[in-house]
Image (cartoon, rainbow, N blue to C red):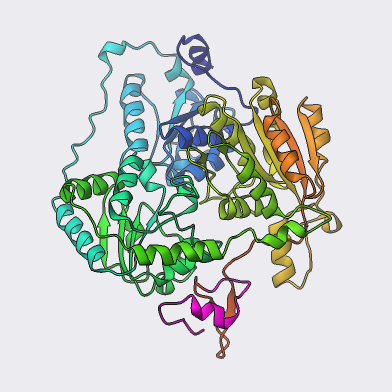
Amino acid sequence: MHLVDSLGKHPSLQYVCNLHEQACAVAADAYSQYTNNFGVALVTTGPGGTNAITGVAGAWLDSIPCMCVSGQVKTADRARDIEVRQLGFQEIDIVSLVTPITKYAVCVNDANSIRYHLEKAFYEATTARPGPVWVDIPLDIQAAEVNGAELVGYAPPKIQPDSLLPGKVRQTMAMLQASVRPIILVGNGVRLAKALPQFLSFIELLGIPVLTTWKAIDFLPENHPLFCGRPGALGQRGANFAQQNADCLLTIGARLDLGQTGYNHANFARAAKKIMVDVDSAEIQKLMTTIHLPICSDAGVFLDTFLEMNNGASWEKSVNWLDWCKRRQASYPVVETHYWEETGYVNQYILVEALSREMSGDDLLIPGSSGACSEATMQAFKVKAGMRIFNTEGLGPMGFGVPAAIGGCIASGGKTTVCVDGDGGFSMNIQELETIKRLELPIKFFILNNRGYGSIRATQRTYFNGAYVASEAESGLTLPDYLKVAGAYGLSTERIVNQTTILEQVREILQRPGPVVCDVNICPDQVSTPRLSSSQRKDGVIVSKPLEDLWPFLDREEFVANMIIEPEEN
């Protein structure tokens, strides 16, 4: 309560009241993602802290710098050195719970150490590989009188420059110059390093085809001359062809998770000499394939060093190779023409296409983080210059979309914010519609209504012979009429039942003042495509198909025509 009292009295701090602590933590994560700075959540002790853990876990996996400050029972009431579970009401050892998912977690036991711990927490959150931190403050420590002028601060360690980096940059230059089909895969590590301007200068210098991860989706607009798509297990077919046919792959700030590598490290860009730049050496060492030039470095430091060492020299552009990649990108759009001919419901990709056309370059897009709302949006959306797009890819929690839209919208200063969410995930933080109404935030929700848990239903259909359990009404799961719920919160509502006038409806919703909740009638059994699939070899072993061979499979003659390297047999 002392923290809350001080917050209310501070003339320069503005606070936002969410109705649930998970929403606070998620909104702080989103605020940080938009500003690339620092978001803070303040929660109470016990259940307030445990409720916030999901948001902190998402920030941990996606390397988002943010802080959670929690209250705690007074020092005398804490069960620290005795064998009991609890002394104080709502007491919980939150520091032990969150230590594995934070860069720094501390309970402040001495009031005079508060400056030290806050400064160290901020340093840890924002330095090297960023991430969340947690500061737990007992009630009596909150209330203590201190002399600010006498408080001891935190002295960050001096970071010595990497003397080996210039040599590795020279090797990078040599490998790129020797290649015929070089390609760049960029991830969010570049933004976290605050190095996006340097990256844009870097690619303009080299003229090399560029692929982006989902976390880096908004680095380049769709019409950028070097942009060749977003590869991966749920990627774009043309982008996967480009990546898999490359003879030199430079990744910068992309941790190469299993979805990015197609669950098969050996097959990932298998014909390419691989250069991997990542601030975390463990992310490089985890890969069970040869990384020909591992560079453990902050992305910004690497790019600055490269540009400085290049000293304005021009590069010979790989024009034919770039043209090859761009033609594959154009030949295999995610949103196929015949999707527009479907009737009776809305194809999820047509909704994404409509949003691509109707949203402006000044808008913010924050989809939910699992299922079709994430997959279709991140796979198919066509980015315009100036847009900001993000969610939490690593943890992928249902319930992320609503509070993240709040955090992002506030961070942007109130820009039009679009959230594509699933009908399952939307209910999980639905109480925050009250926050949105209170603040009159211009957030437009498009709920993919497939009448249940679509991803779970698809798995049960594919691997359990259609034995549905807890995934739709007939198997025990029901969801409310979200337009009635939104109406109870005083929000404007809309429903899109088919594709007949979807462009006009989307345009009108985006232009409508204030928040809007739109229910979109999509096919319950639609799956996200193209996508990686598995197959069974003659010896009975089940293996993932190589990334260049996405399902639905191309005619074999057409597939081979898109391969410069030898196709993989499995």
Range drawn in magenta: 549-570
312 to the left or right of 272 = left
Name which quarter of the figure residue 426 lies in: top right
- Is 119 in front, or is 479? 479
Picture quadrant where residue 489 is located: top right
In the figure, is residue 332 to the left or right of 323?
right
Along the horizontal axis of the image, is 74 left or right of 496? Answer: left
Foreground pick, 122 / 261:
261
Residue 360 inside the magenta-drawn segment: no
Name the residue located 34 percent from the left edge and 38 percent from the top edge. Answer: 194
- What residue lies at 48% left-to-right and 64% top-to-bottom? 327
Which of the pair 233/402 is nearer the observer? 233
Above/below status of 426 relative to 40: below
The secondary structure making up most of the magenta span is loop
In the image, residue 422 lies at what x, y percent? 70, 47
Quarter-of-image position of residue 237: bottom right
Residue 324: x and y, percent?
43, 67
Q: Position of residue 71 (x, y in %)?
A: 50, 25
Asked if residue 144 shows in the view, the reply is yes
